[in-house]
Structure formats: structure tokens, C-alpha cells
Amino acid sequence: MAITIKGSNFQFNLFNVYNQTNAEGEKTLPRAILNTKLPPSSILVLDSNEHHPLWDPLCPTTSQGAQPFIDWIEEQDLELLNTPGVGTFFRPHLSRETVLDLSLVTPDLASKATDWQTIPETGSDHYGLLFSIQTNADLVENPTNQPRFNTAKANWDTFNKELETAIQNSQTLQDMDQISDPRKADLMDLLLGNNTELEQQLEEIDLVQNQKLGGTKS
């Protein structure tokens, strides 16, 4: 399977291959892949059905078709995303997990591919493969990099009055006495409501103080 994934400022080619043996005894890789050059910005995910120490250091034997496939990978300078030795396939009769499912990308995506991992809970003997490809799209604001307020310049009398008014107008905070056995969701609503009011009042008061005193956020 081959598809193209397009966004406003990115495009990937995704190839999904099952290296199965046909009626003539020939596998998919030599039949359809090894004579192909992947275009730039390509991702290849496959059930390789091949064993090799490159991706499975503990495998006792090397498959006959593994080396031609590795030669093809090296010719195109593809990057193997798998963490060597991390299993992707398991059946009860096996003594350990093996590595059959591979993820590869072209050189231009090598530095953009991150967080490779497996998902064992798929209901299959093959694990899911999960990773991210970074793009140049606008990202959401980092919650750990929020602006800090200079609370030393705050007018706390005004803050108290504004916070009291905000609490009186908050439906979540007004309904506290009606929650006999708070659920996690209720407690989360309470926490978020309280934090929202605090952040709003801090921002408004800090802005007023900065305008009066010529201060800035630090």
C-alpha cells in the first residue's frame, strides 16, 4: 500500500509492505521493493518476515533474504527507526519476542522522526509501531514556558475583591456544597475553575500595575 499525506506545509509518502511469499515462492521485497528507489520524504513500514542482528541482535540465525534487503537500505541511506532488540512479534510458543516489523525513513526525515515505540495491546501477534514525524506547522504554546508574573507589583486588595467577585460568579465553585461525594471529574472541574480565575485576575492586575508603574513581566 502506498499513500501520500499532505498538509499545508508538508508532504509524506507512506509505504506499507507485507513481505509475503507468492505462489512462485518469491517474496514481496525482491519482487517489488529491492529494484525501487524511494522518493524523498518517504516512510516505509513493513512486516519484513526477515531475521537479522541489525534489528534483532539476539536472533540465532539470519534469513536468506535479509542481507539483500540490508544492502538496499544502505544504498538509499535509509534510517532504521526501530530500537534494536525491542520485539514487535510474539506468539505463546516462542521463547521470546522477535523483531519482524520495521520502520524506515529517507535521509531528509531521519532527524524529524522521534519517539519510536511499540504498542503490544493490538489483539494481534504483531505489535503496533508508533512514532512521530516533526513538521514545520505551528505548534501549540508550551505549557511549561508560560510567562511569569511579577507578583511583587500586584495590588492585593484589588486582587482579593476581584477574586471574591469571580468566585461568586463561578457556577462550579457555587455548587460545591451540592457535591456529597465528589468524583474525580468534579474535583478536576473545581481545580480548573479555581486556577482559571486566579490566572485571569493575576493577569489583569499585573497588566494594570505595569501600566501604572511602567513595569514588565519577568
Image (cartoon, rainbow, N blue to C red):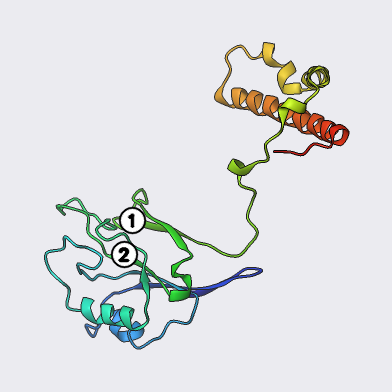
Question: Can you name the residue that lies furthest to the front here?
Answer: 214
Q: Is residue 115 above or below residue 9?
A: above
Q: Can residue 168 be seen? A: yes
- As drawn, the label of residue 135 is none
Q: Amino acid at mark 2?
A: Asp
Identify the element where label 1 is drawn: loop
Q: Position of residue 23 (x, y in %)?
A: 25, 82
| Residue that numbered label 1 is attached to | 127
Q: Residues within 10 Å of mark 2 (few under 14, many from 20)?
A: many
Query: Which residue corresponds to the image point at 83% horizontal and 17% vertical from the top-left?
Result: 161
Report how many numbered discs are placed on residues in the image. 2
Q: Position of residue 112 (x, y in %)?
A: 48, 65
Based on the displayed image, in which of its 4 quarters is residue 172 positioned?
Answer: top right
Q: Work out whether mark 2 precedes mark 1 in sequence or the reverse, and give the earlier one.
A: 2
Find out whether the residues at labels 2 and 1 contact each other: C-beta distance under 8 Å: yes
Marks 2/1: CA–CA distance: 8 Å
- As drawn, the label of residue 101 is 2
Q: Is residue 91 above or below residue 62?
A: above
